[in-house]
Amino acid sequence: MDRVFAQVNLQEFAPSKNLSTFADLVNVIVKNAFMLAGLLAFIILVFGGFSVIMGAGSGDTKQMEKGKNAITGAVVGILIVVVSVWIIQILETITGQPILSPGL
């Protein structure tokens, strides 16, 4: 039997430049915060959906209400993240200064 080894070049995952300025650091933090907020909202949305389904199946109205509130909160969170990205893109267009990609 032949063995198959995967080769991974870790340089592909490294940042393209060092975090030498404060703007570069803020750029990395903001991008990751947007990604984390979207991922967290999606997870809450899924668990809220399961809660509504389980509450409907068992006839538990409190669990259904908790699930509906979780879904509402997740949708509001996603909207806040999307609107904040749009605001940053508008500011980039107005000022001509790249905010989310200063090195590109």
Image (cartoon, rainbow, N blue to C red):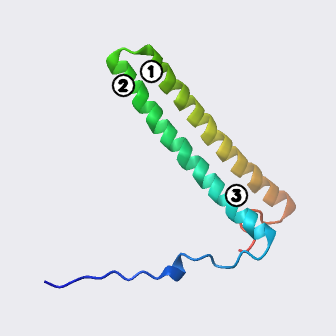
On screen, residue 84 versus residue 59, left or right, reads right
Q: Which mark is residue 63?
A: 1
In the rendered view, does 12 fall on the left or right side of 33?
left
Name the quadrant containing residue 29: bottom right
Question: Is the residue under label 1 in contact with that under label 2 (CB below 8 Å)?
Answer: yes
Check residue 54 in the rendering and tell me which mark sits there, or answer none.
2
Name above or below for residue 57 compared with residue 19.
above
Q: Position of residue 51 (x, y in %)?
A: 42, 28
- Residue 8's image quarter? bottom left
If you read the primary sequence from the N terminus, does the residue marked by circle 3 or circle 1 appear first? 3
Q: Amino acid at mark 3?
A: Val
Which amino acid type is marked by label 2?
A: Met
For image coordinates 67% across by 41% down, the residue present is 80
Q: Position of residue 83 (x, y in %)?
A: 70, 44
Instruction: Say which mark, if any, is on residue 27.
Output: none
Point out residue 35 in the picture as x, y percentages from the top left corner.
59, 54
- Distance between mark 3 and mark 1 Cα atoms: 35 Å
User: Please, what secondary structure does the residue beneath circle 2 have?
Assistant: helix
What residue is rendered at 70% in x and 58% in y?
A: 30
